[in-house]
Amino acid sequence: MSRWRNKLLMLGGLESSYVDLYLSLRTQLDYAASGKDITVIAIVAPHRGSGVTETAANLAITYAQAGRRTLLVDGDLREPIVHKLFGISNRIGLSSLLSYTSEAAEAVQQEVLPNLSIVASGLQPVGAIDPVAAGAGELHALFGQWKGEYDVVLMDMPPMLSSAAAQLLAGVCDGALLVLRSGVVKEEDALRAKGMLETAGVAVLGTVLAHSRRKKVPKRYSLS
């Protein structure tokens, strides 16, 4: 198993306690979203290195394993990792859709795992042009379409406090899961990120305290 694939704890072969943590996270996230019109969920942190991608990918697998039609979208166009984790192509993805060079059907890699489809980030932007800002008008249409096609849409987000695209991407989400790195994140940064999400009109469904000493896995989940 590659070092990237090894981060997909939900594919088995690793400690059951980690698997149980992700299953519990899915259950509690469902509880937080109960009774609300929430399909698109941002997985986001104040800064890089908090375990956002691992959390998003493993959480997506838990939804798919529960029989939910799940779409995982890599919204981190500058430093994408999702395609590496799953060993899929990154030639066409979200950046392609926002630059109008591909159709939605081309960008969705269907059934990467049973019930799990993925939209990779696409080729990284060159120069100063931000494809998210340039294609902001397309975002709502895209995610509106996916909301009608999937039970759950999870977006692996760029860091909230250092990415200009993060707030635009957050604006198309119904809710957010805030991932905080244990022993590293500052309280003021966590509050700033939460405030930015709320300003974008996104319901913060809860927080995950992540990054144990050995692996970036959820240690605790709390409702907001």
Image: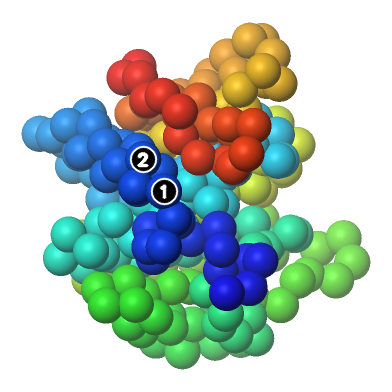
44 w.r.t. 39: above or below: above
Residue with the most extreme left position: 35
| Residue at the (38%, 58%) spot, across then down | 10
The number of numbered badges drawn on the structure is: 2
Q: Is residue 149 left or right of residue 173?
A: left
The residue identified by callout 2 is: 17
Q: Position of residue 74 (x, y in %)?
A: 55, 62
Residue with the most extreme top position: 187
The quarter of the rendered structure image containing the N terminus is: bottom right
| Residue at the (10%, 34%) spot, across then down | 35
56 w.r.t. 73: above or below: above
Neighbor class of circle 2 (other Cα within 10 Å; few <14, some 14-19, many 20+) is: few
Which residue is more in the foreground, 19 or 101?
A: 19
| Residue at the (66%, 66%) spot, across then down | 3
| Residue at the (32%, 72%) spot, across then down | 116
Q: Is residue 92 left or right of residue 40?
A: right
Confirm whether residue 137 shows in the render: no
Which residue is more in the foreground, 83 or 138?
A: 83
The residue identified by callout 1 is: 15
